[in-house]
Image (cartoon, grey):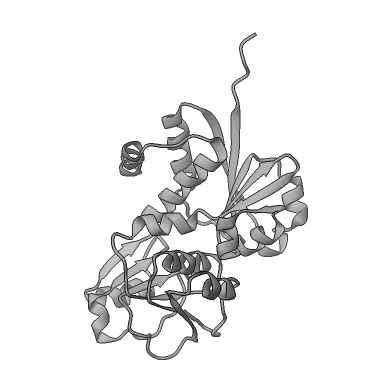
Amino acid sequence: MPEKIKKFDFGLAGWPLKKTSSPAIFNLLFKKAKIKGTYRLFKIKPEDFSETFIKNCRLDGLNITSPHKQRAFELSGIKTESAKKAMAANLLKRKGGKWISYNTDIPAFKKTLKKRFESACVFGSGGAAAAVLAALGELRTGQIYCVSGKGKKTANAEILRAKYPFSKFYFLKQKAKAPAASLYVNARVPCASFPKFPPQAGSSLFYDLNYFGKNKFLSQAAGLKAQIKTGEEMLFYQAVYSFKILTGISIKESAAEEIMRRL
């Protein structure tokens, strides 16, 4: 008898999940790899993303987006080094009766930066911000500011300081004016508010991890005539890296670029 062909069953959990390109990306990856697979969306409120949900989930793999990344890390039975760096997971893979947590946001963010920055300012304190801070540490960024409304540190704050001694990390409460930096990263929800950026920020890169619509971060960047980058490329590459972990199939760079152009 012919060998039974594996059909993968993946999904994405988040809230409120109003817009996402993840299903389109994975469907193109399935097609390019010539394998069968499904990709479903799970709109799950924070209070419902629990041990019970994870235990009853029968998927082969589950991507995680806001606001569940830190909780996914906590609930995972096996934590990889990438997930430990951020203390947040954007990917869970089922192995036997356990879930293994990974963080593909870190390499994806690094992939999308075309140069090294001497200083950076990251807005946010959740799982996405934690991954960006770890990526900047790996890139040996000299001064790294993390700004949040309450001055809250990311869950991986102490890990960052211990693991990346070359970089100096500062966790600040949001004030009227943002610190000067050569890179600004928005890891907040689209409706968030931001401080006023200094005039010299016009020569900085403004990187918004969101990829749908306008927000106050982008409005200020446009007013300064600064260079702007949004999160489509990062989303794509974290999906490519997740796909490899989940299926064992690598997508060549040329094929990945072809898929990205089709989105």
Is residue 250 rendered to the left or right of residue 253? Answer: right
Frontmost residue, 14 versus 100: 100
Is residue 75 rendered to the left or right of residue 37? Answer: right
Q: Is residue 133 above or below residue 19?
A: below
Residue lying at 42% horizontally and 63% vertically, measured from the top left? 209
Residue lying at 45% horizontally and 37% vertically, measured from the top left? 250
* Image quarter (top left, top right, bottom left or bottom right) of the N terminus: top right
Frontmost residue, 30 versus 116: 116
Q: Is residue 180 above or below residue 262?
A: below
Q: Quadrant of residue 61?
A: top right
Residue 40 visible: yes
* Residue furthest out toward the bottom: 176
* Image quarter (top left, top right, bottom left or bottom right) of the C terminus: top left
On the image, the x and y values in percent for residue 75 come to 71, 58
On the image, the x and y values in percent for residue 114 come to 29, 59
Residue lying at 58% horizontally and 75% vertically, measured from the top left? 158
Frontmost residue, 136 versus 39: 136
On the image, the x and y values in percent for residue 255 come to 34, 36
Residue 232 visible: no
Residue lying at 49% horizontally and 85% vertically, measured from the top left? 172
Q: Is residue 45 above or below residue 117?
A: above
Frontmost residue, 144 versus 121: 144
